[in-house]
Image (tube, grey):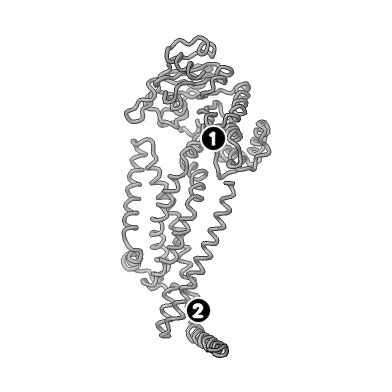
Amino acid sequence: MDVINILDWINNLWSTFVHEFDFVFIQGDRYKQMLDGIFNTLKITAGSLVIGILIGIVVAAIRSSYDKSGARHGFGFAILKVLNAICKVYLTIIRGTPVVVQLMICYFLIFISARDGVPVAIFAFGINSGAYVAEIFRGGIMAVDNGQFEAGRSLGFNYVQTMIYIVIPQMFKAVLPTLCNEFIALLKETSVAGYVGVMDLTKAGNSIAGRTYSYFLPLLTVAAIYLVVVMILTWLVGRLERRLRKSDH
Amino acid sequence: MTTNNTLIKVENLVKSFGDIKVLKGIDTEIKHGEVVVIIGASGSGKSTFLRCLNRLEESTNGHIYFKDTDITDPKVNINVHRQKMGMVFQQFNLFPHMTVLKNMISAPMKLLKMSKEDATNKAMALLEKVGLADRADAYPSQLSGGQKQRIAIVRALCMDPEVMLFDEPTSALDPEMVGEVLELMKDLAKEGMTMAVVTHEMGFAREVADRVIFIDEGVIAEEGTPEEIFGNPQCPRLKEFLSKVL
């Protein structure tokens, strides 16, 4: 094969690609479906992220308060014990069943009248992510030196204030890399949202592939988009980490 | 329950951890402006005693009165009383995610509702006094041990406490940094601050204490002026202890 042949080959490949791209994405405005898919995937990820963090903080606070509690009697402790038991049941069920099953239970059994699957998916993935985030946060809270807690209390902060102003900021910094991992996993898990009729990125790619009988370009494009989003996310978290690290020179 | 001059009164204080009885009935009182130094071998219960005074440890039995309030009563809002009881720890426990200034102003701002300006002025005046004003924007990790402990002391002072509790404040310091912390504590004592100090620094006890308490096996084995304790100890355990540390 000489140089001319190679150039010829590349040229052919390129025109095949352009033709394929035009056929798959441009004709019938199918790229719009793709954009919808990206938008829905990001919406579901962001929404469930917020829900997951909120649930995570509450569950982690309850669980670590229970573990740390000095007085193991009285009315307050009884309430804590009940809350802790509820949290444990929640963690067991959510972590013990596949997210796609949870999603389908939400859509087909709980929110039967829901027409739009996106809010249901945000709810289901949020509840699911909360369980994992809770355990990440609990580990982080337990890793903060107890002296920090005591110093806060000795200044007169109550339990909740000490948590909010002193323990949780330090916990957050410690768990950031692990948390980032969870977010990446969450983003990719949302690819099963198609099971409840949501046009997410994966579903969009799959549907274009089905319509055009061309699987190569749609699926690789879908994969590339996930990859880029994950890389952007990783970069953002890295920047945040560096900013938070300025206090430990 | 207490006379006008008494700030803290401790009655039959008992503290157990599980089956182990650490404090076996302590009775004492701390007067306004008094500097009480608590000495004893490690494991004698002296730190536990100090930590019971602001309920960082919940006592098992007995009563602690702080300005006529029985703070061992579960119905008492201990947070309000802790604001008036500054505490300094062996491990400093500065908040690593905050600058020195933020360490000092967050409690006054959030608990005493001080304006940021007032709190900052107050904190800066205290930093000026201890010669660390130029470190206001530093993070704790950038400070030496002695500096950390001095900041921890002025952080507690920002709340205008009526008593300061010191839990072995110099035990985690390099030897050359012990002096600067003790100097600051001496200044505080001279200004009339009520202080309860658990320490191994016998020189400090001798020089600054109004009263020395020797705790042994969970009880006050002997107490008196520094002259009595160091010059003429009575109890054999105290004699033995002093022969080891002096």
On the image, numbered disc 2 is attached to which residue?
A32
| C-alpha span from label 2 to label 1 | 59 Å
For mark 1, give the secondary structure: loop
Residue A36 image point, x, y percent: 48, 74
- Crowding at dot 2, Cα within 10 Å, few <14 / some 14-19 / many 20+, comes out as few
Q: Is residue B32 visible?
A: no
The residue type indicated by label 2 comes to Lys
Q: Percent from the top left, x then y, of residue B173?
A: 55, 32
Query: Could you tell me if residue B151 is visible in this image?
Result: yes
Question: Foreground residue, B124 or A115?
Answer: B124
Chain of residue at mark 1: B
Q: Chain of mark 2?
A: A
Residue drawn 48% across the image and 82% down it: A30
In the image, is A237 to the left or to the right of B147?
Answer: left
Q: Quick check: A154 above or below A18?
A: above
Q: Which mark is residue B92?
A: 1
Left or right: B66, with A192 as reference point: right
Asked if badges 2 and 1 are on one and the same chain, I answer no
